[in-house]
Image: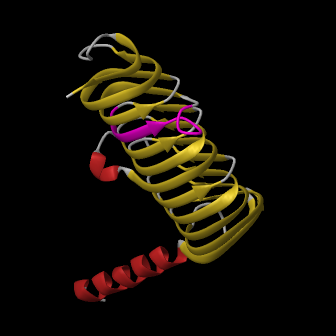
Amino acid sequence: MDLRGMAAALCVLAAGATFAETTPVMVSLVTPVQAPSSEYDVTGFRLSLIYGDCRDFTGLDLGIAQRAAGDFTGIALGGVNIAGGCIRGGQVGLVNWGSSAEADWARRSTGAQIGVLNYAGSFCGLQDGFVNVSGDQFAGLQSGFVNCAADVRGMQCGYYLAFGVNVASGAVRGCQLGIVNYAETMECGLQIGIVNIIAKNGWLPVLPIVNGHF
């Protein structure tokens, strides 16, 4: 076999290997009791009766607890939804977790997390739950009893428009509405609540009712 033939054969084998690592359907009892194995990407549908694990996921994810070790794209409906990389879509469950903490805004998660506890790294969209946390930059709306992020572009809002605690460890450009509001700096915006703290550049470091910077 000449070099061109060998190269062609290698290309065919590589294509076959790539195809073999992607499945349209995955069913899991509890990993590793699942078909196919957790080394596969899923593009389609997964059912996790107790717990399922895969690499990248694209599609509809149903079950009690499920994890994508890589990126997640689609809709996850379950008790615990975990993505090791970026989220593109929605997670609805008791616990929704996007563990990517990359500071690169181009690798941000986008979409919605709706549950009791929601966590993501850089995130753009909606977090609606009892506790909402964005480990880096957040753009959009956090609505819950406790809302935490580094930099905020948008709004942090307590339940019933006021009943909550909002914390931004970095800069805020937008609005914080809750019982207690804290921001390290306010680029442009307002805090409305009982205790409003802007550590560095507010009208005052601490004010009742309203604080801000423009």
Is 200 covered by the magenta stretch? no
Q: Which residues are magenta?
A: 151-162
Q: Is residue 70 visible?
A: no
Residue nearer the viewer, 35 or 63: 63
Q: Quadrant of residue 1?
A: bottom left
In the image, taking residue 195 as reference, residue 23 lies left or right, namely right
Image coloring type: secondary structure
- Count the numbered circles shown: 0
In the image, taking residue 182 as reference, residue 204 lies left or right, namely left
Task: Residue at 33%, 33% (x, y): give it.
Answer: 151
Is 152 covered by the magenta stretch? yes
In the image, taking residue 95 as reference, residue 213 lies left or right, namely left
Task: Residue at 53%, 60% (x, y): give it.
Answer: 90
Q: Quadrant of residue 59?
A: bottom right
Considering only vertical position in the picture, is 104 above or below 87? Answer: above
Q: Quadrant of residue 23?
A: bottom right
In x, y percent, where is residue 162?
53, 32
Residue nearer the viewer, 48 or 199: 199
Q: Quadrant of the C terminus?
A: top left
In x, y percent, where is residue 109?
41, 52
Q: Is residue 160 visible?
A: yes
Considering only vertical position in the picture, is 79 above or below 22? Answer: above
Q: Residue furthest top?
A: 205
In x, y percent, where is residue 77?
66, 61
In x, y percent, where is residue 206?
37, 11
Considering only vertical position in the picture, is 50 above or below 95? Answer: below
Residue nearer the viewer, 213 or 44: 213
Q: Residue furthest left?
A: 214
